[in-house]
Image (cartoon, helix red, strand yellow):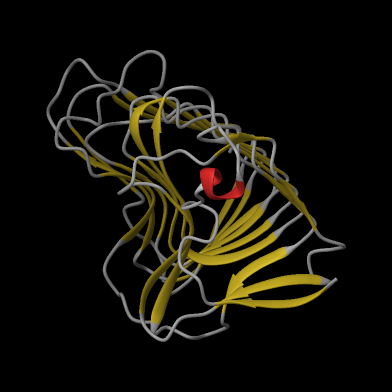
Amino acid sequence: AGVYEVRTNNLLGDIDFASYGLSFNFAFGLKLQGQGKMSTVITVKADNGEIWLYDNLASKKESFIDCHFLDMSIAKEWLNYNYKFNIVRMYSTGTNKRFRFWRCFINGDTIMSLHGTGNADLHRFHDCQILTDECFLDLNLNQAVAVETYSTDFEVMKHFIILNDNGGGSFKQFGGNLEMHAHHSDTSDHFLFKDNGALGGKMGLGNCDFLSQGVRYEIHGANKKLFYANRLNVDRPVIYTFDNCQMGTVSGGSRQAVYARGFNLVVNFHNT
């Protein structure tokens, strides 16, 4: 237990294993476990700019597979908007990555940004509390798939999921609570799901589906909306399904919640 202040960028993503006398290029099974999400607190600070906990986008060097975080808080300095703290920016060339978070409190700007040529996938969040100023999931790889959350509560200030040109998907959200709140400075429209891919994000039958099941939503503010896609590609579907969810606009009145322009764009509401 205790409070640990970190001022190092890329604490976990730039490890030279050879300097420790090790012959491998990446490690399996790193486990970081605290004694409770408010008892073991990692506070990451910077004077300005952007800082990551794990980032191998530039180096393309993969440090860890099966990296697990349990029973701790990983957070930026509260209400300090002079810098951005992001959790994981991953470049993967293959092999399932399986980063897992269990019973953690996470407060950052971008929580997970996935890139590469293969298998930036199989990440899980179990019984966590997550606050995000930018987005929870930033997808930019067609094999950035099978990210799942279980009984995890979110406070989202801008977007929840952003889909970019190189794709990603097969996302599942089971249970929990999600609140969309006002961003401290950005008053433009924000979406639960935003398709930034001009060509539809290289979607296919293996990664086109997004599912939120049994989730309770609070939507605060007229600029908070559900779904945005604006493209004309007939071969790459995007299917988002809300199943047995509860939704309510707490403030801001009525608004167009779904904007879907193009082909093969489906938003399903089942028992919601």
Quarter of the view holding residue 250:
bottom right
Pick the front one: 179 or 119: 119
Is residue 142 found left or right of 122 in the rendered image?
left
Task: Confirm whether residue 183 shows in the render.
Answer: no
Residue lying at the far front in this picture: please name it.
21
Q: Residue at x 71, y 54 (%)?
A: 128
Is residue 53 found left or right of 186 in the rendered image?
right
Task: Confirm whether residue 219 shows in the render.
Answer: yes
Q: Position of residue 266 (x, y in %)?
A: 35, 27
Screen quadrant of the C terminus: top right
Q: Is residue 238 above or below residue 150?
A: above
Q: Is residue 248 above or below residue 102?
A: below
Q: Residue at x 40, y 47 (%)?
A: 56
Q: Is residue 219 above or below residue 184?
A: above
Quarter of the view holding residue 167:
top left
Q: Position of residue 87 (x, y in %)?
A: 51, 58
Is residue 244 found left or right of 258 in the rendered image?
right
Screen quadrant of the N terminus: bottom right
Quarter of the view holding residue 2:
bottom right
Q: Is residue 14 above or below residue 48?
A: above
